């Protein structure tokens, strides 16, 4: 393998040495050359766009001047994406480790050439059908998948957005943020006079949930589809089942004094917590009045009724499943410290 790599490098080096470059021209004018004056220079006339009143000067562009390794027919060409041989992530060939050949590429940005082992999340058959099906409801799901995830998520996303670019009517849509993106979670009940949002919707009856979520996005999502997804997640998702249990037990006015404790435990019973495992009952606890618990610094305590928003620590193991319910349909644990397995790095022969 090393001899083959060295041979390829030598051939590339010899090819570069044998290339013939045209002689450089002296940019200084000679005595016989006529130096152009301002009057003799012809500039391209600016053209006015139909959509805008401001004139836009268009200069001629020489497409043939585009040259490089990834250039085909004077256009940038990165080729088709390929899968990492270890973790099966889709990558560009330009992202491979430099010393690996194109015919057998290896990648480091995804799994460090197989050193990091990330188990797969078992998909739900119904979600796969919605993604790949051809029915009208399947198309509605694919067109509004981001809205559906936002409607079903438990947490809201806090971000400082550049509104000038986001609301611009001309040019390419640009979503620019300043600072960091945070996930926040409110109380079980909204404050007086405010409608239910995010996790608060799960406390209400199923029909109200579907209508409320569809109304947030101006009925671009059908109530029937939302109702079906709600029933699916209340059966499969551990967080949805927790909120469903609060609704079914009919705490009444006592909901204001309830609390939900989501623990951030990287280890369980002395064993390392594996990524994408389902949270246990010890990690999700509904506390009735009089019950106390010791909260760790990164634990999530959801109050019964409060106007405050709690920021979810990005290192919390439930940070991802609370926000991206379609990617963690059963409430599988997300990323946290030491949640992956390691194996020795591959040798040169491998």
Image (spheres, rainbow, N blue to C red):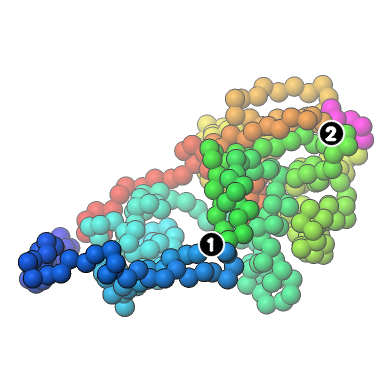
Predominant SS of the magenta segment: helix
Instruction: Decide: few, some or many residues near mark 1? Use Cα within 10 Å; few <14, some 14-19, many ≥20.
Output: few
Asked if residue 104 lies left or right of residue 220, the reply is left
Q: Position of residue 100 (x, y in %)?
A: 25, 60
Where is mark 2, residue-wise?
191
Q: SS at mark 1?
A: loop
Foreground residue, 128 or 91? 91
Location of the C terminus by quadrant is bottom left
Q: Is residue 308 magenta?
A: no
Instruction: Decide: few, some or many residues near mark 2? Use Cα within 10 Å; few <14, some 14-19, many ≥20.
Output: some
The tag on residue 54 is 1
- Displayed quadrant of residue 319: top right
Residue 259 in view in this figure = no
Q: Residue at x 32, y 47 (%)?
A: 344
* Residue found farthest to the front: 39
Q: Residue at x 47, y 38 (%)?
A: 338
Asked if residue 108 lies left or right of residue 145, the reply is left
Q: Position of residue 17 (x, y in %)?
A: 7, 66
- Picture layout, residue 273 above or below residue 223: above
Which residues fall within the magenta stretch? 252-259
Q: Residue at x 38, y 70 (%)?
A: 44
Q: Position of residue 283 (x, y in %)?
A: 66, 35
């Amino acid at each position: 393998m090393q001899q083959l790599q060295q041979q390829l490098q030598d051939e590339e080096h010899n090819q570069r040495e044998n290339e013939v470059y045209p002689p450089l021209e002296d940019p200084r004018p000679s005595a016989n050359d006529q130096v152009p004056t301002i009057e003799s220079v012809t500039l391209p006339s600016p053209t006015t766009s139909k959509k805008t009143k401001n004139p836009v000067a268009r200069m001629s562009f020489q497409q043939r001047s585009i040259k490089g390794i990834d250039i085909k027919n004077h256009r940038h060409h990165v080729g088709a994406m390929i899968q990492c041989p270890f973790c099966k992530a889709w990558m560009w060939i330009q992202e491979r480790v430099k010393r690996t050949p194109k015919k057998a590429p290896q990648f480091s940005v995804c799994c460090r050439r197989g050193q990091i082992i990330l188990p797969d999340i078992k998909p739900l058959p119904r979600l796969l059908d919605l993604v790949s099906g051809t029915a009208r409801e399947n198309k509605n799901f694919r067109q509004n998948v981001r809205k559906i995830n936002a409607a079903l998520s438990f947490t809201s996303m806090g971000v400082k957005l550049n509104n000038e670019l986001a609301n611009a009517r001309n040019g390419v849509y640009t979503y620019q943020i300043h600072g960091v993106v945070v996930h926040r979670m409110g109380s079980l009940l909204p404050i007086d006079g405010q409608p239910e949002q995010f996790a608060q919707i799960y406390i209400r009856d199923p029909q109200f949930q579907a209508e409320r979520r569809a109304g947030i996005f101006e009925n671009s999502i059908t109530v029937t589809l939302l109702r079906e997804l709600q029933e699916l997640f209340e059966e499969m998702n551990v967080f949805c089942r927790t909120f469903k249990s609060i609704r079914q037990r009919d705490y009444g006015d006592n909901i204001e004094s309830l609390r939900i404790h989501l623990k951030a435990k990287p280890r369980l019973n002395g064993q390392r917590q594996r990524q994408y495992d389902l949270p246990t009952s010890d990690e999700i606890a509904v506390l009735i009045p009089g019950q106390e618990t010791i909260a760790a610094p990164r634990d999530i305590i959801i109050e019964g009724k409060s106007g405050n928003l709690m920021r979810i620590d990005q290192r919390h193991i439930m940070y991802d499943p609370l926000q991206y319910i379609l990617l963690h349909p059963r409430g599988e644990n997300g990323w946290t410290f030491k949640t992956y397995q390691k194996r020795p790095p591959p040798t040169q022969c491998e």
